[in-house]
Structures are given as C-alpha cells and as structure tokens.
Amino acid sequence: MSYTPNPKRYSYNNFKRCGDSGLDLPQITLGLWHNFGGKIIKSESKKMIFRAFDRGVTHFDLANNYGPPYGSAESNFGKIISHELKKYRDEILVSTKAGYDMWPGPYGEWGSKKYITASLDQSLNRMKLDYVDIFYSHRFDPNTPLEETADALHRAVHQGKALYIGISSYSSKQTIKMNKLLKQRGIKCLIHQPSYSMINRWIEKDLLKTLKKLGIGCIAFSPLAQGMLSDKYIKKIPTTSRANENSSLSPKLITKSYKEKIINLKKIASKRNQTISQMALSWILRHQEVTSALIGARTIKQLDECLDSLNNLNFTKKELKSIDKFAKEEDINLWSASSKN
C-alpha cells in the first residue's frame, strides 16, 4: 500500500507541551492496544494509522504484549514504520512499555533489570527501530526495589535505546520516588500514563497535583472507559464490541446505573454539539496537567469522531457542574492494583 501524507497535517495545531520538557505531544494519541495485532494487520487498522498521521497525530503508543498474540502489534507497526512511514520517522513519536507478562518464567514480567532490558531489546527488534521515543515502566512492581527499575530505565536512555522515560499506573507516592531516583541518575521522568475518564477519576485525588509540581506530563489512557463513554451500550451490547468479546471489558459492567449516567451525559453533550465520546475527551483535556488523551479505535469513523473532539475543548462552569452530577466512579479501574502502593 503506497502512502503520501497530507501536506496540511500540521495545520490542525493540536499540540501541547509535555510537562516542563521541550517535547510537544498531540492532544490525541493513537494507542495500538486492541485492533492492531494478528499475523497480518487489518486493512482498516493500517488505514487508521495513516489517517491519524494525516490529521496531525504524531504519537503512536504500544507495549510489548499488545496483540494478540503478544508482540504482534509491535511487529505490525514495525512493518509500517520501516516502509510507508520510514521517511517520516523523525516526525513521529513511538512509545512502548514493559511491565506486564510477556513470556514464561520469572524474567517475563514486572520490573527487574533483566526483564526490562530484554523486553526493550525485543520491542526494538520487532519494530525494526534503533530507538523508541518514550519507554515506560508499565506498572509498579512491589517486589523489586524501585532503584533497580530506575537503573534499567536509565540504562535504556544511556544506551540510546530510548529518548525519554515514562511510568504508568504508579501512585502519587511512587511517582515522587521514581522521579527522584531518575534525577539522581541524571535523567527525568517525562510523562505518566494513568487510566482516567469521567467514570474512573482516581488521579484527581493527588496524582494530578503531584505531576504538576514535578513538571511531569500526563497522557490519560482509557479516556473513553473502553467504549463505555459512548452510547453504544444504552440499548444492548453490540456484536462488535469489547463487552461482547468479553476480553478487557466485562459485560457485567454494563449496569442500569451506568446506563442512566450515559443517557444524562448524552443530553449534556448534545447541547455542546458533541457526542458523549467527544465530550469525554474534551473533559479530560481541560486539565492543564493532561498533555494528551490516549485513544483506541476500531474504525476510521471512530478515529475521526475522537479527533473532532478538539473542535470544542472549552467548558462553562455550569456545564462542568452538570457533568459532575453524572460523572461518578463505576469501579472500572482494572489497573488499580498497580497504583495502590
């Protein structure tokens, strides 16, 4: 598939500075957690990557075990970045992560230097890259000294295999510790990737304040709560949906109380000339501390809908007050174990 980028891709002006670094991120980042795996990437998925780049999305987020099968999202993205997007590599930010299970045995997950070092080497090999722009510790490891994890992350930068370091799903307390350890090693934590949405608001307690104080950027993953912040589940569970596939979203979460919240949020969104999903993304990005919202998409139509959220990022006090009546916790944070320490 030949590809020529949109020459006006930077006219969207959708960038935001990441913390107190020198790096700008697009306010919408495309994540490859779902829909980009398999032996051969789907045609629609490949077109989504091109469409995102055409609309000014320069940041693509991966992890070692994205697929399925594990590693296949990186392999598929590697084919694209080494062919159709090869000449545009310096315009693109590629991030990957290590922390969750990737291969059998005691060295295939968590935060040891052995695992993190090997995982990054494997990721680079799959993506056919010399370096990634951002490398994350994907989760906090309570059984490995944080100093060891920091050593491994510093090693990645020192060896030129990563330009920046990030952490994901760390508590405020552990974020402060990791940032200090990295600074002692002569580098800095660029960015934190927590889950955050209208119905998963744990970072508002203290993490956002910590990130602002430390000058660390924030990229919120699952800002649409895996599709729950849309109207797709109001009537029934669609055949092509994560809840129906029962993969990372349990159908048990589609409760009556959840549906009532969505119906009311939809009314507020309609008055803003937005869909619920668009309002949910705009709501995330209203925070000064939030650099980017990390989305997933199944189709180009879904991708465009998300990107169009950038057309209306402003909220009145009245709108925010109305949203708060229904933007309540739904106990959907699948990653809470990592941030409880």
Image (tube, rainbow, N blue to C red):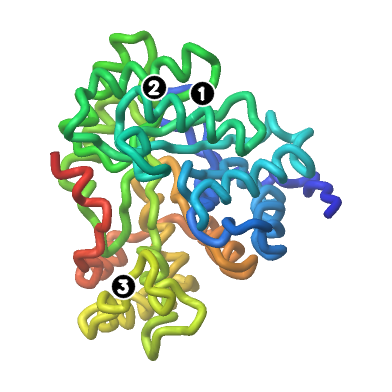
Towards the viewer: 64 or 189: 64
Amino acid type for the residue under numbered disc 1: Ala
- Judging by the rendered image, the residue that carries numbered circle 3 is 250
Could you tell me residue 92's position as x and y percent?
64, 36
Could you tell me residue 36's position as x and y percent?
58, 57
N-term mark: 1 or 3: 1
Amino acid type for the residue under numbered disc 2: Leu
N-term mark: 2 or 1: 2
- In this view, 133 is above or below 47: above
Find the distance from the CA under tag 3 to the CA under tag 2.
Answer: 34 Å
Q: Is residue 192 visible?
A: no
**Residue at the spot 47% in from the left edge and 12% down from the top edge:** 158
| Labels 2 and 1 touching (C-beta < 8 A) | yes
Q: On the picture, is 249 further left or further right than 11?
A: left
Mark 1 secondary-structure assignment = strand
Q: Residue furthest front?
A: 105
Q: Quadrant of residue 155 in the image?
A: top left
Find the distance from the CA under tag 2 to the CA under tag 1.
Answer: 9 Å
Mark 2 secondary-structure assignment = helix
Could you tell me residue 281's position as x and y percent?
43, 58
Could you tell me residue 12's position as x and y percent?
64, 48
- Judging by the rendered image, the residue that carries numbered circle 1 is 162
- In this view, 40 is above or below 206: below
Mark 3 secondary-structure assignment = loop
Amino acid type for the residue under numbered disc 3: Ser
Towards the viewer: 21 or 143: 143
Q: Is residue 226 visible?
A: yes
- In this view, 178 is above or below 140: above
Q: Please rate how many residues cluster around mark 1, counting C-alpha atoms within 10 Å: few if below 14, some from 14 to 19, many from 20.
A: many
- Judging by the rendered image, the residue that carries numbered circle 2 is 153
Q: Quadrant of residue 325 in the image?
A: bottom left
Q: Quadrant of residue 173 in the image?
A: top left
